[in-house]
Image: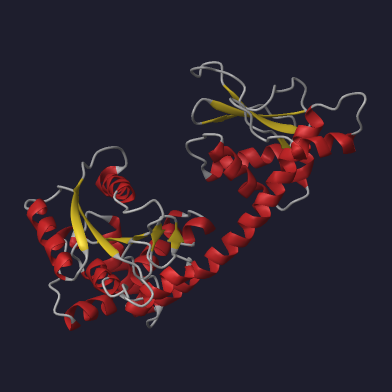
Amino acid sequence: MRTAVCRALAQIGCPAGTPVLVACSGGADSLALAAAAAHLVDAKDGGWPAHGAVVDHGLQDGSSARAEETAALLAGLGVKARVLPVEVVGPGGTEAAARRARYAALRAARPTAESPVLLGHTLDDQAETVLLGLGRGSGARSLAGMATWNPPWLRPLLAVRRATTRSACAAQGLPVWDDPHNADPRFTRVRVRHEVLPLLEDVLAGGVAEALARTAVHLAEDNAALDEVAAEVRADAETRARAEAAVPASEGRAEARARAEAAVPVSEGRYPELDVAALRGHPPAVRRRVLRGWLLDAGVREVSDARLRAADDLVGRWHGQGALALPGGLELNRGRGRLVLRRTASAPGSSVVGSVAPTRPT
């Protein structure tokens, strides 16, 4: 456990002396993580001072008292801890609302702006996440599971089994609290944990959790590579669109492109267009990755697979189709060889998000 935590902090280049925040519920995973983090301070090199945070969601009777007990337990391990009460409200059900509240409280509780937040997700949690993503048809990004490092969130235990965290707590005589919600079949993840995965392990003769976790690692590496390619393609498409948008009579296209490359890509209240020709020569998977990031950055609240494929049709299957309506009062148009976002007439404060949309399609 200590090796996993120390290795994770070293891999992200966290400077010695940087305080870390450990999220702890009192369960075996996060308690074992906190106990390991407590040993990271070394008088010789400074180590990483550990702080603890216990989020009280207020969803169960006695939750505040239990949270205080967990904070006291962490203090006994040498981890300075405090309780963070949160209000679980908002859309998406109890699980989603609790997650939003918890992550917001943890982010705000970091000792410094550079402090990572250590989360106790294990290999078993990763396997469940991959399986849930597979069942929902969420694509490679979802099947890549949870990232080890997604600032400020650090998950040092993604290669550690849940049984190991329990063994670590038992070896140190740490009292483990088992959250009743983790056995409540009303929650989908609980049923995957207690029904689906055990069945798969039985049918496939074991090793399923490890295999799913390996799949997540492979896909995360593939996603990182594709993201790099997509970033280069997007930068080229934006630069070429700026160059094509305004070519003075006294200036050739090469000069216009050089000027566009030096220009600020996003001006106040506007958003860059994308050059269709710069996108068209790339595989659909790369194009859709470019479009997804572009639309999200422009403020499109939800980019579903169907919408993303419809957006890509404006590049790869263009036959003069009209604008594509998007969430948030936006629409996507193609004209004069460029993709442009604009506010719909009914949207509050309607205005063009990219530059002026052309009237004739090409």
In the image, what residue occupies the spot 49% across and 28% down?
328
Compared with 66, 343 (above or below) is above
Left or right: residue 233 versus residue 17 is right
* Any part of residue 295 in sight: yes
Quarter of the image for residue 164 reads bottom left
Residue 140 coordinates in the image, percent (x, y): 53, 59
Placement of the N terminus among the 4 image quadrants: bottom left
In the image, what residue occupies the spot 31% across and 64% down?
192
Left or right: residue 325 versus residue 116 is right
Quarter of the image for residue 90 reads top left
Compared with 226, 310 (above or below) is above
Compared with 291, 353 (above or below) is above
Residue 39 coordinates in the image, percent (x, y): 28, 75
- Residue situated furthest front in the rendering: 44
In the image, what residue occupies the spot 42% across and 69% down?
9
Residue 58 coordinates in the image, percent (x, y): 14, 47
Left or right: residue 225 versus residue 38 is right
In front: 109, or 296? Answer: 109
* Any part of residue 177 in sight: no
Residue 42 coordinates in the image, percent (x, y): 32, 76
In front: 137, or 128? Answer: 128
